Image (cartoon, coloured by chain):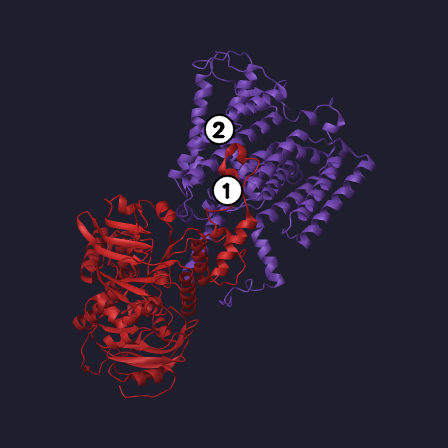
Chain colours: A purple, B red
Amino acid sequence: MLTPNSIPEEKVKLSNKQIIIKFLTNNMVTIMFIVLGLAGFFIAGMNPFLFLFDIVARMSRNSFLVLSLIIPVVAGMGLNFSIVLGAMAGQALLIFVTHWGITGLPGILLCIVLVTPLSMFLGYLTGKLFNKAKGQEMIAGLILAFFAQGIYELIFLQLVGGIIPMENRVLIMGQGIGVRTTVDLTDGLKYGLDWPGLSWGMPNLLRPTLPWTIIVGVIVLLVGYLAYILFFKGKRASMPKLISAAAVGGFLVYWSVNQIQTASMINMVRIPLLTWFVILALCLFIVFFSKTKLGQDMRSVGQDRHVAAVSGIQVDRVRVIAIMMSMVMASWGHIIFLQNMGAFSTYGSHEQIGLYSVAALLIGGATVTKATIGQALLGVFLFHTLFIVSPSAGRQLFGDAQVGEYFRVFVAYGVIGATLAMHAWRKLLQRKGELGV
Amino acid sequence: MGEPYLLQMKNIGKSYYGTQVLQDINLSLKPGEIHAIVGENGAGKSTLMNILFGMEVIHSTGGYEGEIHVNGKKEEIDSPQKAMEMGIGMVHQEFMLLPNFTITENIKLNRENLKPSFLSRVFGEKTKRLDFPTMNADARKALNKLDIDIEEYVMVAGLPVGYMQLTEIAREIDKTNVKVIVFDEPTAVLAESEAERLLEAMKIIAEEGIAILFITHRLDEVIAISDNITVLRDGKLVATKKAEETDASQLAELMVGRKIEKMVHGEERDFKNEIALKTQNLVVHMPGEKVKGVDLEIKKGEFFGIGGLAGQGKVGVANGIMGLYPGTGQVWINGKPLGLNSPSKSMARGLAYVSEDRRGVGLLLDSSVELNIVITSLQNQDKFLKNYGLLRLMDNKGIHQHALKMIKELDIRCTGPTQLVKRLSGGNQQKVCIARALTMQPDILFVSEPTRGIDVGAKRLVLETLVRLNDELGMTIIMTSSELGELRSVCDRIAIVSEGAIAGILRPGDPDADYGLLMGGKRKRRGA
């Protein structure tokens, strides 16, 4: 019998202090943003109602886009800055569908149906490019986005109205060529997906208030989790996790019931139900996908391309598929984003998408090599909290809202830079560790 | 014939661009047989395995000669996939494991058990779900076969090397059709006890009726475990022997093709009474190899050996004098004191060091041969630099020429000075280390474990090089080695280190028993 005498004894036991330090260093970025967000919230003297109103809208419009970044990270391709291309595709379809005059949910569905093959094609090309630039996907994606911007401008400034016929007094510029710099979706695709939640005429069941949504949501989640533990044997429930989840849920329910009874303004915050169902569906899809053969292949490729290739996994193909999936999700995500905004700058609104989405994901605690759904959603929440509070915090502190604005931009770029630097540093340490053996 | 051979390779030959690298190799394997293949670097072991695996490098260069029969049927193995289909598996020298996967996931890598999901109806095979219960059960079965008592849901990251290797083996035996497993130098990275465990596992597998091809350079292992042994030399089959009919020295002889003889001056050499290096109460804090007070006197032009068991401190001596680990005590070079704890000071005094940690400290693996050869001189002696006033740039031409000279002199086998060092074999990497030390033009050369992890033929070349340097250039060489035989074949005197101090100094000709006693810690000072 081979005895396991040299199996590591669950690593060396860390002291409590070491555990706390490790936790703090590993979650430095997230903790910093929680502190910043809270500080800003109190300095600005935010009205909780306005804050919740804003954050619900912002999260529902942006979460899908940020979630689209997860799959390439899993496949070891880093932060996919090339989602800008997907955003362009989505935007292009919004312009055309607006021109065709199809409005509301059918219009959005048409956009989704038509943009899917287009973004798959773009994703395929991008994936091929990334396979030629293995290890440099992030910078390749950034540059690719700049390059694509040129082509996008060529098409919509020069070709549309000319070679591509489009007659539309509202959309096309005066001389008949080129799309105007802003496209207004009002009375068209605006709220195409959000409408049940945001139109006054709809029955209340389709536009629940925030407290009610929380109550129902918590109950559904708890029941679902318990059922999951009970019916899938072999799943060990971790007690501390369960208890803390129950505690948080309990608090939320208590708070919600309280709000409903006091009839505060918060009962005016409505949830765009359909949008959130779509986001939930994407989350469930990602969870499910990670347990499929293809998902496992991506995880393998993400860890070590060479080992994956030797085991017969078609590495390049898997990578291309990962980028295609991300690209399709990004195009959908951008459509969801813009239908909520209601108007967009034709030549600018997609530019910042890659950067801000990546920043949001990183703020949630993700890294170049690891990203989860929870991190994405938390990141969106924290990032937009900062967006909401920083102008008024800036005004309170410096007498100028613009300072808060500057700070926000500084933070977005800073966090990306810092995370990439930290990643490089960790890799260096790892390599040193290997040599030391 | 008549006997049921599992695998037969008949008259296998291979040439690359007109150079015959393999010729007339015959190899037969029966179920449950452990068959060792030994040979020096370049003897053709890896080419033979590449042929067996249908590697692309073989087929993109014109295929091979001869026939491969599996189960008595002639087969054309033209791709690794085909080889796997034929039931040929391989345990790689470098682990093909994913650290953040569990043992199960690694064993089942790309062979996961699947069950249908709602997506797979539309999108096909790739979107089926993984069937973890079945995968875990299969993994458990494979691990049980090897008698490994470790949970299959443990992450591979952090496992001891031996367990990683066993995981790889479990992966091979989990492949239902596997008939032959090739072990490519499996014990090279393992500690003694782990290697033993591995050999045990190999026996278990063989009892299951799976044939094993075992490539290694540890001859005692070959004798201990194999049924049959095939010796290759220069692309030709030299002998196929039954294990019980041969022994390690005969195998070594067959591999090298000449008797391993004493390499130098059988007679004792006399040195002038010039002391090149003197230490007094040298203490070195090197983890695992602590030196607790060493007094030595080494004469100019001497080939001095430092031996002893692992962990007793022999490796620490050179590391301390070179300033790589913190040390205290007195050291004199040519009669003048040397400040410790500073590698650059030591080098400035004409010392050079070939480290025992070749791949870690010794080499810049991702850099070229030429840069590796000159880097120390470049940094410490301002050699190979061109001065342009404010700027000093590398003299690429000079470096290239010097590298070519070294490659020729030391017979470094590489495609040229610009090849990456990590692509070289162990023996040639060692020569690059020596070339770098020589570029410093040292008075005293420290060499630690110069032959660790390289095969018999390359060992010999490395040792011969050292002897030549000592003879022709009069360089004082201090060699640390765990292999006594090696020390005794080249050194004038050998100090045995035990418990951090010199137990005694012996001549190569002294009886084995003396060495044994000193290594065991018995102090017995003999005149030297």
| Identity, as a three-letter code, of the amino acid under mark 2 | Ser
| Identity, as a three-letter code, of the amino acid under mark 1 | Lys
Q: Position of residue A74 (x, y in %)?
A: 50, 43
The quarter in which the C terminus of chain A is drawn is bottom left
Whether residue B476 sits left or right of residue A46 in the image: it is left
Q: Position of residue A420 (x, y in %)?
A: 48, 46
> Does residue B60 sit above or below B298 in this rendering?
above
- Image depth: mark 2 or mark 1 in front: 1
Residue holding disc 2: A119
Whether residue A77 sits left or right of residue A284 in the image: it is left
Estimate the spatial distance between the alpha carbons at disc 2 and disc 1, rounded to whole Å: 23 Å
> Does residue A10 sit above or below B132 in this rendering?
below
Number of numbered discs present? 2
Q: Is residue A306 among what the camera can see?
A: yes
Whether residue B256 sits left or right of residue B315 in the image: it is left
Measuring 41% from the left and 39% from the top, which residue is drawn there?
A316
Q: Are marks 2 and 1 on the same chain?
A: yes
Between B220 and A419, the residue placed more toward the observer is B220
Q: Is residue B390 among what the camera can see?
A: no
Mark linked to residue B123: none
Residue holding disc 1: A293
Q: Secondary structure at mark 1?
A: helix
> Does residue A24 sit above or below B130 in this rendering?
below
Of the image marks 2 and 1, the number of the one nearer the N terminus = 2
Chain for numbered disc 2: A
Between B326 and A307, the residue placed more toward the observer is A307
Between B387 and A279, the residue placed more toward the observer is A279
> Does residue B283 sit above or below A356 in this rendering?
below
Q: Secondary structure at mark 2?
A: helix
